[in-house]
Amino acid sequence: INTSYSTMQKKKVAVVYDGEIELAKGFIFDGKTAIEPENIAIYATQRALDTIFFAHADISSLKQIDKNINTRVPIKKIDGVRFRPDSVTIKINVDKFSNKDINIPVTCINVPEGLNIKFFPSHIKVSVTLGLKQYKDTKDSDFKIVLDYNKIKDLNSSTVPILITSKPEHALIQSLHPAEVEFILEKQ
């Protein structure tokens, strides 16, 4: 009796999810989507292990989510490969959302002594999307717009584009009005 065999080797890989998570209208993610465990063991020949870098969780059925989900999903099968465990838990938290307008002052760093910089307008109206859980706790002071004098001093223009330099992780920026400000330099 002739038999052929190959020894199985072990490797740990990260779990990623394939597909899209589709939320119902009026909902946003509340925090990050979690996969538990984040890494799993795979068993295969060394040749197969050299070509596998991730284990793929199949979430193709997660559509129109309007409540928190904590569900077990299988790992996509690959011929000749065993996964341990062969399924993972996906946790998705969602929240209803609302928009909020915030006024943020424009500030500047690295302005040399004896020089003053003024922005027109001096405040930017920012439209953000927030989950209802964070809506009341999110304040204008949680956001910052800071420009660096060293980056704008040599501009050939009297306007500079605006960038949000600090914001809460849960806030989604929708728009800035205006997206640019004019500035003038004054000697003190």
Image (cartoon, grey):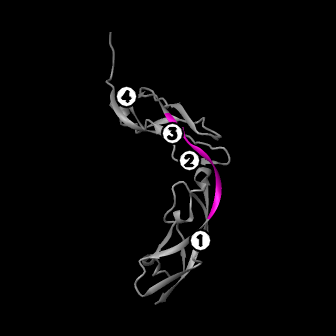
Q: Secondary structure beneath disc 2? A: loop
Q: Residues within 10 Å of mark 3 (few under 14, many from 20)?
A: some
In space, the residues marked 4 and 1 are separated at their CA atoms by 57 Å
Q: Secondary structure beneath disc 1? A: strand
Q: Which comes before the other along the chain, label 1 or label 2?
A: 2
What residue sits right under mark 1 in the picture? 124
Rendered image quadrant of residue 182: bottom right
- Residue 159 position in % (x across, y down): 55, 79
In the image, is 83 to the left or to the right of 130?
Answer: left
What residue sits right under mark 4 in the picture? 44
Residue at the outermost right position: 25
Nearer to the camera, 32 or 6:
32
What residue sits right under mark 3 in the picture? 17
Q: Amino acid at mark 1?
A: Ile
26 is higher (above) or lower (below) than 57: below
In space, the residues marked 4 and 2 are separated at their CA atoms by 37 Å
Q: Which comes before the other along the chain, label 4 or label 2?
A: 2
For the residues carrying marks 4 and 2, which lies nearer the camera in this image?
2
In the image, is 102 to the left or to the right of 16?
Answer: right
For the residues carrying marks 3 and 1, which lies nearer the camera in this image?
1
The stretch of residues the image draws in magenta is 89-101
